[in-house]
Image: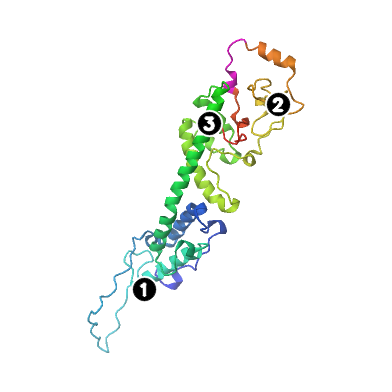
Amino acid sequence: MSSNANALSNLLVFPEDHQLVGLSNWAIFQDHLQSIAHSMGLSGYLDGTITAPASPAVGAPPAPAAAPSAAPPALTVTPINSWTPLAEEWELCDGQLAGIIYQNIKDPRSIRVTQDMTVHQMRTRLTNEYDTMSAAAQALAKEYYFKQLEALHKAASDVGCTVQDEDLRSHFLTSLPLDHLWILQTHDACSYSDLKCALLEYDMMVESANSSATSSVTSNALVVSGKTNNSVVCNNCRHMVHVKAKCWACGGGSEGKGPCWYTAPKCMELTTTISAVTVESTSVPAIAAATIYDFGDYDFGDWDGKLLPF
């Protein structure tokens, strides 16, 4: 393939959600750009490994004129991805990829990206702008999540719940929305702490891809909103995030086994007889609540049951 106008594609316009608007979709823009550059054979221009040929020295004596009968010297055309392109070829390829980058940034002037920059200069400017911001955003999201996690863990311990690593992993995996069911096959054997780290990293990538459409960024992967759990509804009390077998209300599979702070929905309160039977049947120090404790239905403080598993 030769480096001529017919060998290069026209300027490409990315899909709307792939065009760079800021930190919210920087990761997906970067991945898409690298894919485009690789498919065009211009990755070396993007990472700076293919540099511009040296220009002739200023003041160098002109080449001697060729004899009238001599044929003009033939130029050797190099491939597009050649590491030693001619000056004209380098300018054409670099300008083509630079145009693609510039056209797919919503507001290039706001981040000081100009049309006269080379491809490598544009990429360096973008990475300097967003990589540091991205690392800071991830650190803040993790700090915010772990503060909530510690508070809810303490609240669960205060009501007598014994939470083990196996319980945490099991409750969290079974509470995931349908879009995350693949995690059950890839992370079911690891510890809960490893699972948290893997999902936090995964969520940052997903939210970066979806934030331009939703106009919001979720703090971390373990904050599951009510919208994502609409598919899990109790057939007994009609509350979300748990099933009938784990329902504490009258008629549920775990009827009467809720903690002391639990209040059943209206018209589904437990009767005095049921409560008495429940108390008498637990003569042995009961820790069953720890094994059936449904953190997905936890309604403590301001979190409104959205942090899973607890």
Residue 186: in sight, yes or no? Answer: no
Q: Are marks 1 and 3 in contact (CB under 8 Å)?
A: no
Which stretch did the figure color magenta? 283-291
Q: Residues within 10 Å of mark 1 (few under 14, many from 20)?
A: few
Residue 289: in sight, yes or no? Answer: yes
Q: Tell me what residue is drawn at x 65 percent, y 35 percent.
A: 232
Q: Residue furthest bottom?
A: 68
Q: Earlier in the sequence, mark 1 or mark 3?
A: 1
Q: Which mark is residue 264?
A: 2
Q: Residues within 10 Å of mark 3 (few under 14, many from 20)?
A: few
Dot 2 amino acid type: Ala
Based on the picture, tell me whether residue 181 belongs to the magenta stretch.
no
Measure how far apart labels 1 and 3 are at the Cα level: 63 Å
Based on the picture, tell me whether residue 290 belongs to the magenta stretch.
yes
Q: Residues within 10 Å of mark 2 (few under 14, many from 20)?
A: some
**Quadrant of the drawing holding the N terminus:** bottom left
Q: Earlier in the sequence, mark 3 or mark 2?
A: 3
Residue at image mark 1: 88
Q: Is residue 238 above or below residue 67?
A: above
Residue at image mark 3: 151
Q: Tell me what residue is drawn at x 46 percent, y 56 percent.
A: 35
